[in-house]
Image (cartoon, grey):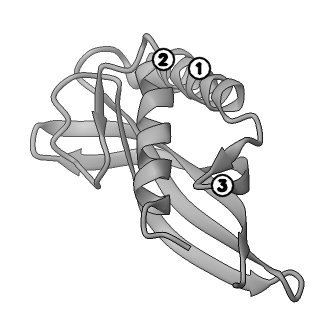
Amino acid sequence: MTNAIYTTIIEKIRTSLEGVDMVKEISSFPNDNVKSYPGVNFYPSELENSFETNEENKQVRGFKMDIIIGGEQKSWDDIFSTILPKVVDEVINQLASDWNAGTIEGHRTWLKVDSGDWGFFQAQNGMMAVATLNLSVKLLTNNS
């Protein structure tokens, strides 16, 4: 197995996010200093590895994805009932469209997106609304 799997996944996620017109800023690290909204941060969060067969391992490479909107633009009700759900739906739809169970580094892949927490946090430039998505990239890798 090569070391380029994480790099390839990060590039693929970034490319998918660049296809979402509403997303104005993308970071591949935890970033609470978003300047353009909606902003999306994504970063590796976990790795699970198990033996599938004598010839293959199953890996699940997890990523957290935070979709962030500044609270000074609109009312909190508008952000949580309209803006944030629309951006989340567009991101999920773009990921589903781009990730069609292809391959990464020659390994068969699948993408699963689960919802995480929605809420608030205090950032350097004010209160932010955030919706977190949990991405699981599943790969079958060779044991040899």
The residue sitting at the left extreme is: 124
Residue at the spot of label 1: 90
Residue at the spot of label 2: 20
Q: Which mark is residue 106?
A: 3
Disc nearer the start of the sequence (1/2): 2
Which kind of residue does numbered mark 1 sit on? Glu
Q: Residues within 10 Å of mark 2 (few under 14, many from 20)?
A: some
Q: Is there any visible trace of residue 3 in the rendered image?
A: yes
- Mark 3 and mark 1: Cα distance apart in space: 28 Å
Contact between labelled residues 2 and 3, with CB atoms less than 8 Å apart: no
The residue sitting at 52% across, 73% down in the picture is 46
The residue sitting at 48% across, 17% down in the picture is 20
Q: Quadrant of residue 142?
A: bottom right
Left or right: where 39 falls relative to 80: left
Contact between labelled residues 2 and 1, with CB atoms less than 8 Å apart: yes
Q: Secondary structure at mark 1?
A: helix
The mark closer to the camera, 3 or 1, is 3
* Residue 99 x, y percent position in the rendering: 68, 35
The mark closer to the camera, 1 or 2, is 2
The mark closer to the camera, 3 or 2, is 3
Between residues 81 and 1, which one lies in front from this camera angle? Answer: 1
